[in-house]
Image: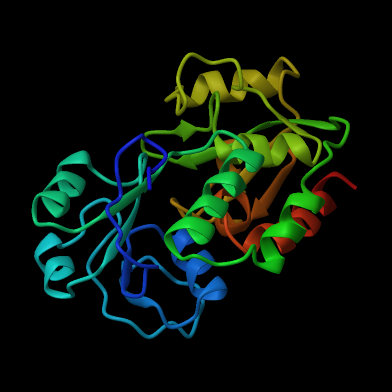
Amino acid sequence: MIDDLGEVVPLRAPAARVVSLVPSLTEAVEVSAPGRLAGATDYCTHPVDLDVPRVGGSKYPNVDEVLELAPDLVLANSEENRPEDVERLRANGIPVWVMEASATVPGALASIRRILTQAYDLAEPDWLVEAEEVWRETLPERFRAVVPVWRKPWIVLGRDTFGGDVLHRVGIGNAYADDEERYPRPKLEELRARFAAEDANLLVLPDEPYEFTADDGPEAFPGAKYVLVSGRHLTWYGPSLVEAHAHLTRLVL
């Protein structure tokens, strides 16, 4: 088997004892193949009743604790996990499947299909088929948004991001879609200028990785129309995509 980055994943049998370092993959594999997770990160919040050992954060997992769990497979992501952690696991004989950080919904679902059907030897789960169907079409653009994911400093979604494609498909364009960076760091004055110039007419504020709220975020953009959204609906590429489409579509109605 070959992962998304072209690396060999030397599994000798379907994965049965897996540590996931990626919250959205944790949900995807537990829903699709219950009981095969041996560990997950502190940020793996779904399924909400998941009861497995925790191995630290996604960016900085405790590799020693992962090794102690003796998994037959570790799931990682090219954007969320450090290459040095992946290499250390492989050097200790642990197969690692690295999912590439997809820029599109179809790309992410295709990657998950490969993990589930190859590493887990499963048939396509119903949720994945449904997600592909509901996200197949793209709605006409009705808003053009600035989408912060952090403040102090301000960081926004730029080009080729999964969250940007999610919004694009429900009719919300990204004001920074043509930026050179995937996660630009514009000054607040520049962000405000986008609204003043009518280059943006919607502020989309997710609750992760930075937890924007009605009292933390909108006040920086006086007069701008804003919506608070679930970061899970915006950036997770698992079963939540099925419900995310309906929730996010309501924003443009």
Q: Is residue 192 above or below residue 137?
A: above
Q: Is residue 46 left or right of residue 16?
A: right
- Residue 106: x, y in percent? 66, 41
Rendering coords of residue 162 (x, y %)? 57, 39
User: Which residue lies at the image location 44% right of the left edge and 66% below the top edge?
Assistant: 26
Residue 236 x, y percent position in the rendering: 55, 54
Question: 189 or 126: nearer the eye?
Answer: 126
Say if residue 72 shows up in the picture. yes
Reply above or below: 17 against 80.
Answer: below
- For the residue pair 245 and 83, the one nearer the viewer reads as 83
Q: Residue at x 53, y 46 (%)?
A: 111
Residue furthest toward the front? 12
78 vs 104, left or right, is: left
Residue 236 appears in the figure: no
Q: Please name the colour scheme applied to the rendered image.
A: rainbow
- Image point (15%, 44%), residue name: 87
Of 37 and 219, the residue lying toward us: 37
In the image, taking residue 228 as reference, residue 25 lies left or right, namely left
- Say left or right for 143 vs 205: right
For the point 30% across and 62% down, the residue is: 12
Q: Which of the 4 quarters of the picture holds residue 36?
A: bottom left
- The answer to whether 139 is drawn above or below residue 125 in the figure is above
Among the 4 quarters of the image, the one containing residue 168: top right
- Give x and y (percent) for residue 232: 56, 58
